[in-house]
Image (tube, rainbow, N blue to C red):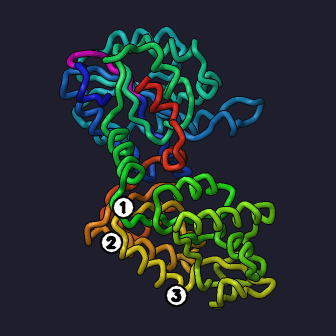
């Protein structure tokens, strides 16, 4: 059920958005992508004469407390993002409530007129949020007639504002926003009868972080390209020498079972033929390119080499459906970024030739932006953990709470 499928005209909506945006040392927003992503839903409601209560979290303030156990309000308050939100809604009156529990907040919500917005303070200032507290969710529900969840980035959290609150709204009184619609439909395009061949590109540091994803991909993928630090555990499992590269020794057996299962299912798993290695985890380290299975002791693989880039790109270019989660190396350091940037180029080129491509996960999203190719792929997900769990086949609390 989506926002344009229910009657919202002149109603008061409480919308869970994902305004968890990066800030600099002066608490200024440095990337407005997530704010922009929420605007179509907000503007649609405003155009229908609705008044709106917006709620979001920002960071993890409960885990970063200052002296005497109090929350660092200055760093995590949503006051920091008001000007950025207002810049996308210049003709809209926006109020701010600095205490969700306060009676004043209830009065402010009651006083809203059509076309006006009330932004609530950071939901994670309250321990009740992460606990999915019923009383907190019920309190939030009383601020509006209709609940809209448009925060895909937190849909995998069973929090009060993302899941519990939906219990207090009946069918026709709760729905997904347009961003959620895009995210869910993009994931569905890859998990429900995707166009073949399907290629999954998986990177990142640890096999343990991605094993559920890898196992799930065996159901739909024709090819799985694996890069990043996690590749070396798999290379070691196959008998390679990986020097001082990242290794999860306790995952060797799991890696072998995955490779065997992939073979049995006819899924081609491609590991990097060669690697750019360094004698230290530093941009100033000495580097060389060697076979990924013959890395000398004291050296570590920090990016895929030229042979790997070519074989990965060739596979990507022959694909009709592509999902990319995780970088191919330590792309934050320019000297080890070329492998990841090559993948970004290949995914963009394959998309231009008609493939459907989805990029999800914080690091791969950052990489596609760094490569300047974000507008050249089919869809860039705003939710790292949420998209990962969706592709793993898990049910997201923020989704099931609307559907059920």
Disc assigned to residue 357? 1
Q: Which residue is mark 2?
A: 350
Q: Which residue is labeled 3 in the image?
A: 306
Among numbered discs 1 and 2, the one appearing first in the sequence: 2
From this view, report whether residue 139 is shown above or below residue 243.
above
Q: Secondary structure at mark 3?
A: helix
Q: Secondary structure at mark 2?
A: helix
Q: Which residue occupies the foreground of this view, 269 or 127? A: 269
Q: Quadrant of residue 402?
A: top left
User: Mark 1 near mark 2, Cβ–Cβ under 8 Å?
Assistant: yes
Q: Is residue 18 above or below residue 343?
A: above
Q: Position of residue 250 (x, y in %)?
A: 80, 61
Quadrant where the C terminus lies?
Answer: top left
Write the start and end of the magenta stretch as one range. Answer: 9-15
Question: Callout 3: 10 Å neighbours few (<14), some, many (20+)?
Answer: some
Q: Earlier in the sequence, mark 2 or mark 3?
A: 3
Q: Earlier in the sequence, mark 1 or mark 3?
A: 3
Residue 398's spot in the image, x, y percent?
A: 48, 31
Which residue occupies 52% across, 88% down? 307
Front residue of 178/90: it is 178
Mark 1 and mark 2: Cα distance apart in space? 8 Å
Q: Nearer the viewer, residue 149 or 347?
A: 347
């Amino acid at each position: 059920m989506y926002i344009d499928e229910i009657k919202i005209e002149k109603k008061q909506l409480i919308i869970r958005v994902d305004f968890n945006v990066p800030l600099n040392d002066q608490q200024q927003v440095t990337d407005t992508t997530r704010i922009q992503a929420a605007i179509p839903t907000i503007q649609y409601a405003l155009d229908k004469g609705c008044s709106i209560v917006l709620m979001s979290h920002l960071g993890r303030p409960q885990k970063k407390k200052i002296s005497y156990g109090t929350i660092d309000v200055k760093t995590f308050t949503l006051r920091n993002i008001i000007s950025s939100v207002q810049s996308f809604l210049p003709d809209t009156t926006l109020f701010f409530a600095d205490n969700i529990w306060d009676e004043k907040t209830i009065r402010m919500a009651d006083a809203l007129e059509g076309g006006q917005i009330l932004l609530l303070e950071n939901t994670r200032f309250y321990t009740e949020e992460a606990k999915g507290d019923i009383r907190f969710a019920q309190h939030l529900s009383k601020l509006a007639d209709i609940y809209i969840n448009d925060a895909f980035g937190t849909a995998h959290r069973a929090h009060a504002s993302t899941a519990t609150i939906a219990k207090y709204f009946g069918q026709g009184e709760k729905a997904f926003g347009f961003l959620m619609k895009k995210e869910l439909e993009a994931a569905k395009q890859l998990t429900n009868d995707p166009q073949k061949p399907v290629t999954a590109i998986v990177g990142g540091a640890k096999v343990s972080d991605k094993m559920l994803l890898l196992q799930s991909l065996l159901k739909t993928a024709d090819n799985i390209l694996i890069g990043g630090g996690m590749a070396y555990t798999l290379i070691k499992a196959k008998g390679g020498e990986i020097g001082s590269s990242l290794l999860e020794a306790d995952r060797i057996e799991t890696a072998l079972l995955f490779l065997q299962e992939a073979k049995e299912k006819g899924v081609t798993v491609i590991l990097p033929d060669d690697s750019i290695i360094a004698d230290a985890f530093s941009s100033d380290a000495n580097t060389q390119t060697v076979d990924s299975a013959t890395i000398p002791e004291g050296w570590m693989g920090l990016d895929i080499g030229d042979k790997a880039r070519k074989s990965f790109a060739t596979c990507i270019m022959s694909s009709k459906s592509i999902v990319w989660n995780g970088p191919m190396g330590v792309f934050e350091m320019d000297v080890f970024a070329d492998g990841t940037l090559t993948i970004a180029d290949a995914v963009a080129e394959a998309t231009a030739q008609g493939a459907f491509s989805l990029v999800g996960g914080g690091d791969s999203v950052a990489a596609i932006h760094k490569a300047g190719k974000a507008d050249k792929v089919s869809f860039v997900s705003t939710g790292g953990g949420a998209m990962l769990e969706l592709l793993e086949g898990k049910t997201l609390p923020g989704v099931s709470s609307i559907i059920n």
